[in-house]
Every structure is written in structure tokens, then in C-alpha cells.
Amino acid sequence: MASSSDSWIKEYNEAVKMVDDINAMISERSSLPASGPETQRHASAIRRKITILGTRLDGLQSLLSRPTGKPLTEKEMNRRKDMVANLRSKVNQMASAFNMSNFANRDSLLGPESKPDAMSRTVGLDNSGLVGLQRQIMKEQDEDLEKLEETIVSTKHIALAVNEELDLQTRLIDDLDQHVDVSDSRLLRVQKNLAVLNRRTRDSCSCMCMLLAVIGIVILAVIIYLLIKYL
């Protein structure tokens, strides 16, 4: 076993601790809502830690390919490679659970495809350089999370505006329905009044016809009487 001062072992122990932290965060998901901004931020934080952990493993692998200090025996070298492989297997399992394509495509978390991948960014870096790279990645992820939060807030405002517009349209439709009901009622009253007027008109016509008929009969009777009297 290497001494506790071995920088590689220190980096490895920190990677193991990060695995435990990620597992704890994954366990906390059960206490969060199924969806929502808080759940999205929590999942993004987990993905970010998985990305940083992958960078650490790349750094550990890189250190094994160019060991510094006291040379390692072949047995120790193979043991450390197995330790990294086991950790990477756990990382791949966690990444797969978060739809990160077995951690093969971490560029989506690190930024546009034009950004260099994590492995190429660790080449030539010592321990302090790896720490600086990890901080840079965390800063980039914080910026991505801020943009995501701004997008969510903007989407929320748009949804509220659409909801208000829908409420307004609903009220307008209700008012229109009320006006239509009032117009229907008025139209029915007018139709009833027209029906009554029509009946009265027919009755008046009948009375007039009868009156004219009586007058006609009287005139005819007078004419007949005069003819008989003077002829």
C-alpha cells in the first residue's frame, strides 16, 4: 500500500468521497417532488458532480500514464488501474441512471461541442491544474444553471401571461353568451307581439268585411225597393 502522502491516493480518496456524496444526493431525490424547478436543479447538480467526478478519474488515469516521483511496481500500477476502472464503472452506472449515455457524451453538460472534452483538458495538468479545471467546470455549470433558471422563469412568465389571456377570452365569451341570451329573449318577445298583432289584424279584417257586406245588402235592398216603388 502506498503511503498517505501519495498524491495519487489522495486524489483517489477524494474521488471515492465524491461517489458517496453523489449517492447521497441520489437518495435525496425521493424526498423531492416528481417535477419542478427544485427537482431540476437537484438533478442538474447531480449531473454536474458526475461530470466533475469523470474529470477526476480522467486525471487519475492521466497520472498513471505519466507517474511522478518513485516509480510504481507493475503490480501496484495494475492495482491502481483496477481501482480507477471500478470507480469509472460506478460513475457510468450513475450517469446511465440520469440518461447521460453511459457518460460517453459529457459535452452536453460542459457546454457546446466546440469545447474540448474533459480528457483533453486534463492533459499536461498537475494536481493544482486539475483543481483549477474542476473549478472552471463548476463555474461553467453554474452559468448553465443560471441560464436554465432564467429560461424557466421566462417560461413561467409566458405561461402566466397566456393564462391571463385565456381568462380574459373566457370572460369575453361568457359576456357574449349573456348578450346572446338577452337578444334571444328580446327576439322571442317581438315574435310573440307580432303574432298577437297578426291575430288582431285578421280579426279586424273579418269585422270590416262583415260590415261592408251588411252595408252592401242594405244598399241593394234600398235599390230594389226604389225600383219596385217607381216602376
Image: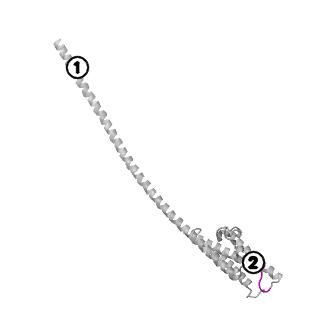
Image spot of residue 207 (x, y percent): 27, 31
Q: Which residue lies furthest to the top in this view?
A: 231
The 10 Å Cα crowd at callout 2, few under 14, some 14 to 19, many 20 or more, is: some
- The numbered disc on residue 220 is 1
Image spot of residue 24 (x, y percent): 65, 77
Give the residues drawn in magenta, as a range: 59-70
- The numbered disc on residue 133 is none
Q: Does the magenta stretch include residue 67?
A: yes
The 10 Å Cα crowd at callout 1, few under 14, some 14 to 19, many 20 or more, is: few
Q: Give the colouring mode of the picture.
A: one colour
Name which residue lies at 35% across and 44% down. Answer: 189
Q: Please name the residue that numbered disc 2 is placed on.
A: 62
Name which residue lies at 24% across and 28% down. Answer: 211
Quarter assignment of residue 196: top left
Q: Is residue 62 visible?
A: yes
Look at the numbered discs 1 and 2 and tell me whether their residues touch, using CB distance below 8 Å: no
Q: Which amino acid is tagged 2?
A: Ser
Name which residue lies at 71% across and 76% down. Answer: 122
Q: Is 218 displayed left or right of 166 in the figure?
A: left
Q: Is 154 displayed left or right of 182 in the figure?
A: right
Image spot of residue 219 (x, y percent): 21, 21
